[in-house]
């Protein structure tokens, strides 16, 4: 015969007034409420961070939105004041594109093609030269004596002043001759046991990377003056394809270090 188990009042009192179901309820951990508070706070911080990112994204996209809608504005909408919403503040039109491509407002495709070709060629050269420099730094060990670098600066600057002021040479010739002599002298001087610190690959990498912090005007202004002097010698470099490529290739070169 099968025995039936019957819950008596005494058993119900021992189980807290409930019948024994065969399962014991686990008590909640002491830090349960603290964990719940932490999770709620983490969700609030995440929502605030998302809201901040959306606001910053809108701030960054505002100039692009302004340029985009301005391309479709009629002249009246551009000259009469700020307008923001298409079909509400103004009626979009393709008049600006028709005038640009038809040549009414001047040559558009010519300068656009020139800028694109200069950008492509200078980018290709910068990647090529930067990859070669990165391979050399990663593959070989360089030892450049600091005193040899100082000697290069002294010969380059001093030689330029002497050749230009006292020898009467033009600026391009004086600059090229002084830099060529400085490179040759420094190459052989670096092989000597000169006193002072010796720079290695890490120092060269730091030097290349630190040059990216210079504003482009530092080199562009000097290069502009050099091109102007070359123009006086009959060699046109200003506003020319070779001159622009030479100007933009070093500025676009990031010198990757592997």
Image (cartoon, rainbow, N blue to C red):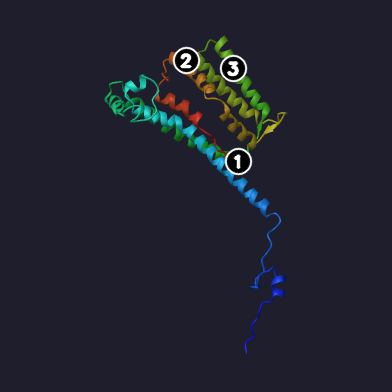
Closer to the chain start, of discs 2 and 3, is 3
Residue under numbered circle 1? 140
Q: 113 or 144, which is in the foreground?
A: 113
Identify the secondary structure beneath mark 1. loop
Mark 2: give few (<14), some (14-19) or many (20+) Cα within 10 Å. Answer: some
Check disc 3 and report its element: helix, strand or loop.
helix
Number of numbered discs: 3
Q: CA distance from mark 2 to mark 3?
A: 18 Å
For the residues labelled 1 and 3, the Cα–Cα distance comes to 32 Å
* Disc 3: which residue: 159
Q: Earlier in the sequence, mark 1 or mark 3?
A: 1
Which residue corresponds to the image point at 61% horizontal and 29% vertical from the top-left?
187
Depth order, front residue of 27/198 = 27
Q: Give the spatial CA distance, label 2 vs label 1.
A: 38 Å
Q: Is residue 146 above or below residue 226?
A: below
Q: Secondary structure at mark 2?
A: helix
* Image mark for residue 229: 2
Judge depth for marks 2 and 3 and give the one in front. Answer: 2
Q: Residues within 10 Å of mark 3 (few under 14, many from 20)?
A: some
């Amino acid at each position: 015969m099968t025995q039936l188990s019957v819950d008596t009042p005494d058993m119900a009192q021992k189980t807290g007034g409930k019948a024994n179901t065969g399962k014991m309820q686990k008590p909640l951990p002491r830090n349960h409420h603290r964990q719940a508070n932490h999770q709620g706070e983490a969700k609030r911080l995440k929502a605030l961070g998302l809201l901040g990112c959306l606001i910053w994204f809108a701030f960054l996209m505002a100039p692009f939105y302004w340029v985009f809608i301005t391309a479709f504005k009629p002249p009246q909408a551009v000259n009469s004041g700020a307008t923001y919403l298409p079909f509400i503040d103004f009626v979009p039109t393709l008049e600006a594109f028709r005038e640009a491509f038809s040549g009414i407002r001047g040559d558009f495709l010519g300068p656009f093609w020139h800028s694109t070709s200069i950008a492509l060629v200078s980018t290709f050269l910068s990647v090529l030269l930067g990859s070669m420099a990165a391979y050399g730094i990663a593959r070989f060990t360089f030892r450049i004596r600091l005193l040899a670098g100082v000697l290069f600066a002294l010969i380059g600057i001093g030689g330029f002043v002497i050749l230009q002021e006292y020898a009467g040479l033009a600026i391009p010739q004086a600059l090229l001759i002084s830099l060529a002599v400085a490179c040759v002298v420094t190459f052989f001087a670096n092989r000597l046991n000169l006193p002072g610190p010796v720079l290695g690959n890490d120092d060269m990498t730091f030097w290349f990377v630190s040059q990216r912090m210079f504003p482009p005007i530092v080199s562009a202004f000097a290069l502009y003056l050099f091109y102007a002097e070359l123009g006086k010698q009959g060699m046109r470099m200003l506003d020319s394809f070779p001159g622009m490529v030479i100007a933009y290739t070093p500025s676009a070169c990031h010198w990757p270090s592997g």
